[in-house]
């Protein structure tokens, strides 16, 4: 039995769909009945909370493999550590951990938090597979589309640093393979990069083509980006973590392209152009759609 945590999340939903295709028995974990009610038809669900050990024990009953993912929040290390401890008590055999690019050597922000969880998992005695994905293509629509619709522009302090964006659906395929065939993937750590690296200016050009109008990337000072996020009401810890993560990417370390993902997928990864074409309606001009 496989347990998919974070089944309502960006990657978790995709993992659920891919695990379904394997034919392996699984259950999807949700934090509330309301979230569970939105699960696909005929999916076995369980309500549990990373902060509630009793609920985790119930969720893990009869489970052999776990996909572990947590939202990027300050309690991430504690919450994911709880799951690892619960897995040990429940005699789970294999954990697939959704970590982050940079966890190997970046001592700030989310990568540093993930590294602490990686270390705990490695020392736990559990069989494990660790995945460190690059930035998600899906975040482009989630975070850049609003200003693109309103102003035909998006803003950040990324300079000319390249990023090799990865489609979450490709991450999900790798997760599903590791869950379905744990002995083939146990003890391995994979850094997952997309098929090409682009700067934000190049990304703006790509979006321009699918949006059929000029989209501009505006490079702003980090201080201006910080003020903008705080003015939007984002908590200070989150602003700091995001800016520190951005510093990792502006160092150029997010622009690698390797053969790891194609080899794990047994095919070529989904391309940025294909993704942008799929979500082009997200970039539609507000005035045009009024």
Image (cartoon, rainbow, N blue to C red):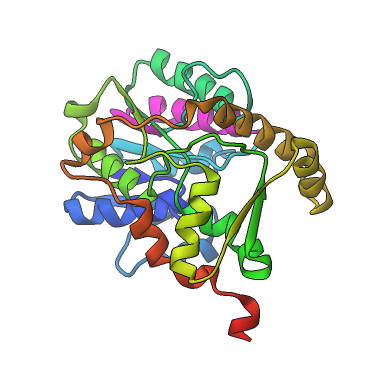
Whether residue 1 is visible here, answered yes or no, is no
The answer to whether 269 is drawn above or below residue 129 in the figure is: below
Task: Say whether residue 224 is left or right of residue 255.
Answer: right
Which residue is farthest bottom? 290
Task: Say whether residue 270 is left or right of residue 153.
Answer: left
Which residue shows up at 49% across the image and 36% down it? Answer: 162
Q: Quadrant of the N terminus?
A: top left
Which residue shows up at 30% across the image and 51% down it? Answer: 270
The answer to whether 156 is drawn above or below residue 162 in the figure is: below
Q: Position of residue 185 (x, y in %)?
A: 22, 28
Which residue is farthest top? 123
Which residue shows up at 54% across the image and 46% down it? Answer: 200
**Front residue of 65 and 8:** 8
Is residue 81 found inside the magenta-colored segment of the image?
Answer: yes
Q: Position of residue 46 (x, y in %)?
A: 42, 53
Task: Say whether residue 266 is left or right of residue 225.
Answer: left
Q: Position of residue 228 (x, y in %)?
A: 79, 49
Quadrant hosting residue 256: top left
**Front residue of 151 and 105:** 151
Which residue shows up at 63% across the image and 86% down it? Answer: 290
The answer to whether 85 is drawn above or below residue 125 in the figure is: below
**Front residue of 27 and 268:** 268
| Magenta part of the chain | 74-97
Is residue 85 found inside the magenta-colored segment of the image?
Answer: yes
Quadrant hosting residue 3: top left
**Front residue of 286 and 119:** 286
Q: Position of residue 214 (x, y in %)?
A: 56, 65
């Amino acid at each position: 039995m496989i347990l998919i945590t974070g089944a309502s999340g960006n990657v978790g939903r995709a993992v659920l769909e891919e695990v379904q295709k394997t034919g392996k028995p699984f259950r999807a974990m949700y934090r509330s009945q309301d979230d569970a009610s939105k699960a696909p038809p005929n999916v076995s669900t369980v309500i549990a909370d990373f902060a509630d050990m009793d609920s985790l024990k119930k969720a893990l009953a009869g489970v052999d493999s776990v996909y572990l993912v947590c939202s990027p929040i300050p309690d991430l290390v504690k919450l994911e550590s709880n799951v690892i401890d619960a897995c040990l008590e429940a005699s789970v055999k294999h954990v697939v951990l959704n970590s982050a690019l940079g966890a190997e050597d970046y001592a700030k922000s989310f990568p540093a938090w993930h590294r602490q969880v990686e270390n705990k998992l490695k020392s736990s005695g559990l069989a494990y597979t660790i995945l460190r994905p690059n930035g998600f293509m899906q975040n482009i629509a989630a975070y850049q589309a609003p200003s693109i619709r309103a102003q035909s522009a998006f803003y950040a302090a990324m300079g000319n640093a390249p990023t090799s964006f990865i489609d979450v659906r490709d991450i999900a395929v790798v997760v599903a393979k590791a869950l379905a065939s744990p002995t083939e993937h146990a003890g391995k750590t994979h850094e997952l990069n997309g098929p090409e690296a682009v700067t934000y200016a190049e990304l703006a050009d790509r979006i321009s083509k699918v949006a059929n109008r000029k989209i501009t990337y505006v490079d702003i000072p980090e201080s201006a980006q910080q003020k903008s996020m705080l003015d939007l009401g984002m908590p200070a810890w989150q602003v700091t973590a995001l800016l520190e993560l951005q510093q990792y990417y502006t160092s150029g370390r997010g622009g690698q392209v390797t053969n790891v993902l194609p080899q794990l997928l047994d095919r070529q990864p989904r391309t940025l152009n294909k993704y942008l074409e799929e979500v082009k309606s997200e970039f539609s001009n507000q005035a045009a759609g009024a």
